[in-house]
Amino acid sequence: MSEPGSVPDAGASGRGVEEPGRAAEPGRTDGQRGVSGDRWVPGDRWVPGNRWDLVDGLVPDPLPRVSVIVAHYEQGDALARTLRALARQEYPPELLEVIVADDGSRHPIDVPEDVRVVRQKDRGFRLSAVRNLGVRASTGEVLCLLDADTAPEPGYVRTLTRLPALLPDAVTVGRRRHADLSRLPADAPISRAAETALREPEWLADEYARTGNLLEADDRSYRYVIGAVMACSRALFDEVGGFDESFTEYGGEDWEWTHRAWQAGAVLAHVPEAVAWHDGPDWAGREDDRRDAANTQTLRLAAAIPVAGSAGRGLLPSTPDLVVHLRGVHAAASVFVFVDSVLAAFPLARVVLDEVPDMDVLRGDPRVVQADAGGGAGSVGGGAGLLTGPGSRLAAVAGWDC
């Protein structure tokens, strides 16, 4: 079974080199990663590539403060079940903060005294915005995202947050299982959900098995990180930026965020021991017709993620996979050679010029754009020789001899 939101795969490039633009660890200079090849130095907070397995068996000491952000809209019974499950977590309660982020529910929300509620006005489906709201209100070093209809087993927070606590670049995704929770007593422990378990989605299970729980992740592995069962460090969330609030329909916002995180150097890991139970079947297993919504999600992501197999095969993506800024004014022939060389090597790149020569071949190519008056490139952002659009790789052009 193929996963939802998939464009016929033209192959994934994988990530074989360290991305430029990486922020250095505090107290280090760029390039001092503390690792060599497949080695990990005890005490270091980085691993080479996606090698999170190098810290298998290690436990963070001390444990971090964790903020659990529960996204909610008009699901009072499900929310109560999830909050009861969070109260039973095998994690020090003084280090666990629970915040319900409400997307404008019409009915009042009943929560325990130690749970905070933040709200936004009801302006339609705004899951991205309400998650960002919850994160802004939180104080934890590690963020754990849940949906109101997804109740975690007792070891969930402890196991899902271990890697982000050890490796600030880690993004972890738990095992979201499915059950008919309406058949259980309201106060039943969530571990009894197995009594009413539904079929798990094959497209997820197959990919986790193929990649060794995402140890062998590549440029398209963002598709296997589910926002309802996700954790990351606050440092990474802030570096990448929050969820894209222009997503106002079901699905896609978690994949777009994960793609940006991966491009920024995130480590992706599936943690099958971190189990949370979703009330009802997987999207693909529901009886209602979700085809239009799935197509909308696929088209939106195709425009936002310039990766082979995700973007279209023939159309130029609206988001380039590389943005290069040539600073200064140069001879027209030199600019032609520079631009032609860049686009020959990176056909989906965008080249930003401080001054575009009066040449039809350059002015007629939509991948060649004029920098704005401030030295940037408008919609793709700008900086002193560093430019990127959402999800794009970075490129610096410094000292190019034209």
Image (tube, rainbow, N blue to C red):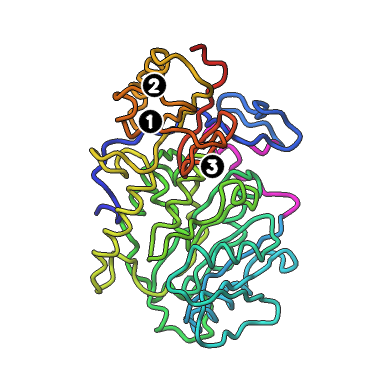
Residue 86 coordinates in the image, percent (x, y) = 60, 72
Residue 346 coordinates in the image, percent (x, y) = 36, 26
Residue 297 is a magenta residue: no
Report the amino acid beneath label 1: Val
How far apart, in angstroms, are the residues tagged by discs 3 and 2?
Answer: 30 Å
The residue lying toward the viewer, choosing from 328 and 309, is 328
Q: How crowded is mark 3: few (under 14 residues within 10 Å), some or many (20 or more)?
A: many
Q: Name the residue under label 3.
A: 266
The residue lying toward the viewer, choosing from 56 and 323, is 323
Mark 2 and mark 1 residues within 8 Å of each other at the beta carbon: yes
The residue lying toward the viewer, choosing from 45 and 266, is 266
Q: Residue 339 carries which label?
A: 2
- The label nearer to you, 3 versus 2, is 2
Q: Mark 1 points at which residue?
A: 368
- The label nearer to you, 1 versus 3, is 1
Q: How crowded is mark 1: few (under 14 residues within 10 Å), some or many (20 or more)?
A: some
Compared with residue 71, is residue 217 higher up or lower down, i.e. above or below? Answer: above
Q: What element carries label 1?
A: strand
Q: Main secondary structure of the magenta part?
A: loop
Residue at point 69%, 49% (across, down): 60
Residue at point 54%, 42% (across, down): 266
Residue 10 coordinates in the image, percent (x, y) = 26, 37
